[in-house]
Amino acid sequence: MAEPQRRARGSTGSVLLLVPAGILVLLALAGMAFDQAHLHQAKHQLITLAESAANDAVTYGVNQDILRAGHGMSLDPDRVQTAVAQAMNWPDGSVALTAWHIDIISNTQVHVTVTGTVRAVFLRALPGFGDLTTITASADAVAR
C-alpha cells in the first residue's frame, strides 16, 4: 500500500499568491488582445478612408472641359485636392487623422496616403507600453 505524500513545511497558502498573480497576467494578456483588435479595426478604417478618398479623387477630379472637348480624360489637381479634402471629413473618434497626402501619378491615376493615431484602451495603464500608435494606410485609384 502506498503511503500518502507529505506536504513540505511552509507550502500552505502558496495558492493564495499564485491565483491573483495568474489573474493579473490573464488580464494583461486580454488587454493586449483587445488593443491589438482595436488597432486592427482602426487600420481597416484608415484603409477604407484612403480607398474612398482615392476613388472620389478620380471621380470628381476629372477635368470636365477637357473631357467634353473630346481630348480624353485628365485629372484637374485642384478638383482632386477638393475631393480628397471633402473625403477627409470623417466623424469617427477612434482614429485621429494627423496627415494625408495626394500624389497624382498620371493623368488618370492618384495615390492617397492617410496617417492617423490610435489611443490604446488598456495597455496605457501598464508601464512600458505607449499611449498612442501611429498607423498609415494608402490606396491607388485609376479613372477609366
Image: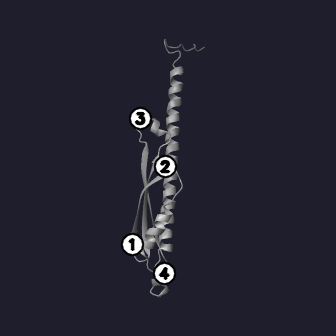
Q: Earlier in the sequence, mark 4 or mark 2?
A: 2
**Above/below status of 41 relative to 86:** above
Give the residue drawn at x 51%, y 22%.
17
Discs 4, 3 touching: Cβ within 8 Å: no
Per the image, the residue denoted by label 3 is: 127
Give the residue drawn at x 39%, y 75%.
106
Q: Earlier in the sequence, mark 1 or mark 4?
A: 4
Image x and y of residue 31, in percent: 51, 39
Per the image, the residue denoted by label 4 is: 64
> Marks 1 and 2, how far apart in space?
30 Å
| Residue type beneath disc 3 | Pro
> Marks 4 and 2, how far apart in space?
40 Å
> Marks 4 and 3, how far apart in space?
56 Å
Discs 1, 2 touching: Cβ within 8 Å: no
| Residue type beneath disc 1 | Ile
* Crowd tier of the residue under label 2, counting other residues whose Cα lies within 10 Å: few below 14, some 14–19, many 20 or above: many
| Residue type beneath disc 2 | Leu
